Image: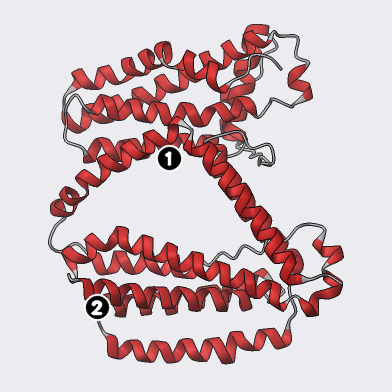
């Protein structure tokens, strides 16, 4: 007989051990330093950004949208594995304690995350809504209570056998959360009582009925757990190589012309890297997001020579995260039997990465030039990309890429 209490404890401990292991690898990455510097720079100009916003800025509406989405989205890690469909399905009636532990863990994580997000947005509340530590405690309490409610009912929602039915109830929860958050940030506490009554009815007389009518949807729970696991692996993969990560391949036929394969020895690897960058995983999305975030920092920080330091940090972040594309082929047999020396493969990767950095620098330069009119610094941004590729990239390659198969 399987002891579900010990099973959850064992899997939770294994999950925490793996998380701490990857976190230590992330902490040793230079990317962490870049992120910390960007956070420091962003925090310095956060107050200035708030002061620059107009007095009629719709803070209540923006906060309502943000927290409506956050409260509705309630992920629950069940730590299920593929073999559970065989070994745990026969003891489904005894799995209540196991899933109760999962819900408790998700509740603690959700409450803490809600408090962190609200703390980050608290300056907006102070400027446009209300100030004082009592309001911080009040808003924080009501938001955490709503998050706990959403996690509980979203679990019962997962009992529904069809995704379309789950989506309908998720939309209903979003509407309730929207009204709840809007009343909260308008400090309409009397009307919040009515919303609490609606939440009580939903919890006990709508979602509470699902447990009597439906059992656990094992396939859906397993698919959700696998998706959450891969999302975590993709995050860690930005910092270090994750062998367990399963890459998703996207068609993107409208971009395939950029990666037309060449059988010439000098061009084959460049075509392979480009095709992988466009179609595999989230590399292209990462590139676009980093460029857009870079635009935001260039807009936020006052014009000056220190803007070159900002773009250097973004070059560093992008380079560190793209080295995982090369290591993706480390154990690929087809890649290993290419009649091309390993040193040539690494050199081709460096050249390909330099071209992406140069393109990134050109984007930054054009944006900065039109934004400020200072075309001298704008021209120096792609030059900085070239300098970065010549001076910094070789040492990073020695550190992150093994020259032997």
Residue drawn at point x = 53 percent, y = 40 percent = 24
**Image quadrant where one finds the C terminus:** top right
Query: Considering the numbered disc 1 on the image, is that residue within a helix, a strand or a loop?
Result: helix
Q: Is residue 256 visible in this depiction of the protein?
A: no
Q: How many badges with numbers are in the image?
A: 2
Q: Identify whether 109 is placed above or below 31.
A: below
What is the CA distance from the residue labelled 1 to the residue labelled 2? 33 Å
Give the image location of residue 261, x and y in percent. Answer: 66, 19
Which mark identifies residue 336?
none
Residue drawn at point x = 75 percent, y = 58 percent = 81
In the image, 99 versus 163, the foreground residue is 99
Residue drawn at point x = 63 percent, y = 18 percent = 402
Which mark identifies residue 289?
1
Left or right: residue 157 compared with residue 8: left
Query: Considering the numbered disc 2 on the image, is that residue within a helix, a strand or a loop?
Result: loop
Residue matched to label 2: 186
- Label 1 vs 2, first from the N-terminus: 2
Residue 66 sits in which quadrant? bottom left
């Amino acid at each position: 007989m399987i002891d579900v209490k010990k099973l959850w404890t064992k899997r939770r401990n294994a999950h925490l051990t793996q998380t701490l292991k990857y976190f230590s690898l992330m902490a040793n990455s230079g990317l962490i330093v870049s992120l910390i510097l960007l956070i420091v720079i962003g925090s310095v100009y956060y107050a200035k950004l708030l002061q620059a916003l107009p007095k009629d800025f719709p803070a209540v509406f923006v906060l309502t949208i943000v927290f409506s989405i956050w409260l509705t989205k309630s992920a629950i890690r069940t730590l299920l594995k593929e073999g559970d469909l065989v070994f745990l399905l026969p003891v489904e009636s005894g799995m209540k304690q196991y899933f109760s532990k999962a819900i408790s863990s998700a509740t603690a994580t959700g409450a803490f995350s809600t408090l962190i997000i609200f703390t980050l947005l608290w300056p907006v509340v102070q400027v446009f809504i209300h100030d004082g530590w009592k309001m911080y405690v009040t808003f924080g309490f009501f938001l955490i209570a709503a998050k706990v409610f959403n996690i509980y009912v979203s679990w019962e929602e997962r009992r529904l056998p069809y995704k379309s039915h789950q989506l309908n109830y998720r939309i209903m929860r979003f509407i309730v959360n929207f009204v709840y958050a809007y009343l909260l940030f308008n400090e309409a506490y009397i009307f919040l009582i009515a919303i609490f009554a609606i939440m009580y009815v939903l919890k006990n007389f709508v979602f509470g009925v699902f447990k009597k009518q439906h059992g656990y949807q094992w396939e859906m729970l397993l698919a959700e757990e696998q998706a959450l696991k891969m999302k975590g692996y993709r995050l860690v993969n930005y910092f270090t190589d994750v062998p367990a990560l399963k890459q998703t391949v996207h068609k993107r036929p409208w971009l395939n012309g950029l990666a037309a394969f060449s059988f010439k020895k000098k061009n084959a690897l460049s075509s392979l890297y480009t095709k992988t960058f466009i179609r595999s995983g989230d590399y292209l999305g990462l590139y676009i997001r980093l460029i857009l975030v870079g635009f935001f920092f260039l807009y936020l920080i006052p014009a000056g020579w220190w803007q070159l330091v900002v773009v250097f940090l973004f070059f560093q972040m992008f380079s560190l995260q793209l080295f995982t594309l090369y290591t993706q082929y480390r154990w690929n047999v087809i890649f290993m039997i290419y009649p091309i020396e390993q040193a040539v493969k690494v050199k081709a990767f460096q050249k390909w990465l330099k071209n992406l950095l140069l393109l990134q620098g050109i984007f930054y330069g054009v944006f900065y030039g039109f934004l400020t009119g200072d075309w001298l610094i704008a021209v120096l941004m792609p030059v900085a990309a070239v300098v970065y590729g010549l001076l910094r990239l070789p040492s990073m390659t020695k550190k992150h890429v093994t020259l032997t198969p």
